[in-house]
Image (tube, grey):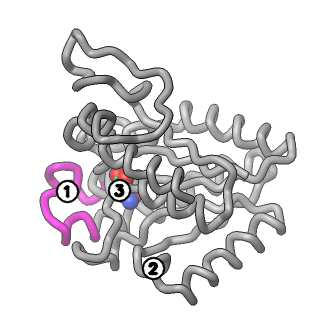
């Protein structure tokens, strides 16, 4: 059972339209994983980036929380339609789950989310999860889908969580630095590894970045 998280920069092009061609190749891979008998849960970003373009909001909809929440409300519909259409092309049924941090911190709601995901997978659907950005307030939101994906992996009792990004891995310093070296494998995350991750989203389209990816890996490792 896999959780596959897709970042905003992969899903949405600079002009705010979906990168359909790339997404179609990913969906084909998801379909073949399903064909091999693997369960797949998708965690999809991109609502804010898609919605901001439609509402013509500055800074990709991230100027303030109210903008981000409005953008997410518009973009989430487009995002759901996109996944539903592309998965449908492979005979797969998409299912949308919008979660907040609170849904996963409260035991009853956590168990309920586990049951829903389990039932959807059993019924053959492909759950597509995002944070419920339009209602989650600043203090009680994940803000990035990396940690959300790691928590979803826990909820779904997944064997692995894959974080797909426009960066090809962890670098020992900012990848913008020409001397930066890619670290092919990390076993165990410690202070030295954390120090390699710099700043937030490089594309500016999402909100994660390598810092939240390492935090996600820690959550997954602990689980
Ligand atoms: N939930 C946000 C969205 O759909 C993305 C958060 C992130 O960038 O990780 O736009």
| Number of residues whose C-alpha sits closer than 10 Å to that of mark 2, classed few (under 14), some (14–19) or many (20 or more) | few
Q: Give the residues drawn in magenta, as a range.
A: 54-69
Q: CA distance from mark 1 to mark 2?
A: 26 Å
Residue to which mark 2 is pinned: 105
Quadrant of residue 72 within the rendered picture: bottom left
Ligand 1 location (quadrant): bottom left
Can I make out residue 50 in this image? Answer: no
Mark 1, secondary structure of its residue: loop
Residue to which mark 1 is pinned: 62
User: Which tag, 1 or 3, sits closer to the chain's start?
Assistant: 1
Q: CA distance from mark 1 to mark 3?
A: 13 Å
Q: Residue at x 80, y 46 (%)?
A: 34
Q: Residue at x 59, y 58 (%)?
A: 153
Residue to which mark 3 is pinned: 144
User: Which tag, 2 or 3, sits closer to the chain's start?
Assistant: 2
Find the residue positioned furthest to the bottom. Answer: 108
């Amino acid at each position: 059972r896999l959780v596959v998280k897709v970042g905003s920069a992969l899903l949405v092009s600079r002009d705010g339209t979906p990168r359909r061609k790339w997404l179609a190749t990913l969906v084909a891979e998801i379909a073949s994983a399903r064909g091999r008998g693997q369960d797949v849960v998708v965690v999809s970003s991109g609502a804010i980036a898609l919605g901001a373009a439609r509402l013509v909001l500055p800074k990709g909809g991230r100027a303030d929380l109210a903008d981000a929440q409005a953008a997410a409300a518009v973009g989430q519909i487009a995002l759901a339609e996109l996944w539903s259409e592309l998965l449908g092309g492979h005979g797969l049924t998409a299912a949308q789950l919008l979660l907040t941090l609170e849904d996963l911190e409260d035991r009853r709601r956590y168990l309920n989310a586990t049951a829903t995901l389990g039932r959807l997978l059993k019924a053959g659907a492909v759950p597509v999860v995002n944070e419920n950005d339009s209602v989650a307030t600043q203090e009680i939101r994940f803000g990035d889908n990396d940690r959300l994906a790691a928590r979803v992996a826990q909820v779904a009792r997944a064997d692995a969580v894959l974080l797909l990004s426009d960066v090809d891995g962890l670098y020992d310093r900012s990848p913008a630095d020409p001397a930066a070296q890619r670290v092919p494998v990390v076993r165990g995350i410690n202070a030295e590894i954390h120090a390699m991750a710099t700043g937030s989203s490089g594309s500016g389209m999402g909100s994660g970045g390598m810092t939240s990816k390492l935090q996600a890996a820690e959550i997954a490792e602990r689980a």
